[in-house]
Amino acid sequence: MALTFSDKKQILTLKGQNYSDRKIASKTGHSETTVRKVIEEARGKIVGLNDIGAEKIAEQLDYPLEFVKLILGREKQLDTIKPEEKSDVLANWKDFKDQQQLKYAKKR
């Protein structure tokens, strides 16, 4: 069953109120995967319009203003991370994943 715009707006409203994806899924009856897809799709649209301001984005896309502000705030935080720090985070994540895979393989 396809999500209606009303369903999507409810998901975005709850995310704008800082609900976790799991809590949103529970409240709306949709899977966490669906919730994440809706949020990620909306984030992509918002980031593409970043230069016009939160209020205009919310009005243009008919998204909840709090959700738009949340996404723009997160994007602003990401922009403050230096490129070399981003690569360090990715390298650390890869190391962590590799270690977890080894632990799992040893258990088997």
Image (cartoon, rainbow, N blue to C red):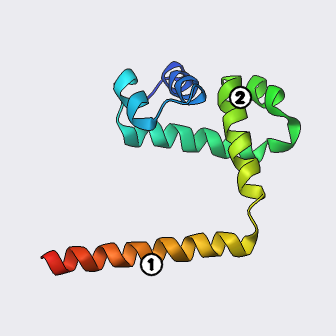
Q: Amino acid at mark 2?
A: Leu
The furthest residue to the right: 52
Q: Residue at x 35, y 77 (%)?
A: 99
Q: Residue at x 49, y 29 (%)?
A: 19
Residue 46 visible within the image: no
Q: Amino acid at mark 1?
A: Asp
**Direction from residue 47 to residue 105 in the image, left or right:** left
Which quarter of the rendering shows the N terminus? top left
Q: Write down the residue under mark 1.
A: 95
Circle number at residue 61: 2
Which quarter of the rendering shows the C terminus? bottom left
The furthest residue to the top: 6
Residue in the foreground of this view, choosing between 51 and 108? 108
Q: Residue at x 65, y 46 (%)?
A: 44
**Direction from residue 55 to residue 11 in the image, left or right:** left
Q: Position of residue 18 (x, y in %)?
A: 55, 30
In the rendered view, tell whether residue 79 sits above or below residue 32. below
Q: Position of residue 21 (x, y in %)?
A: 44, 36
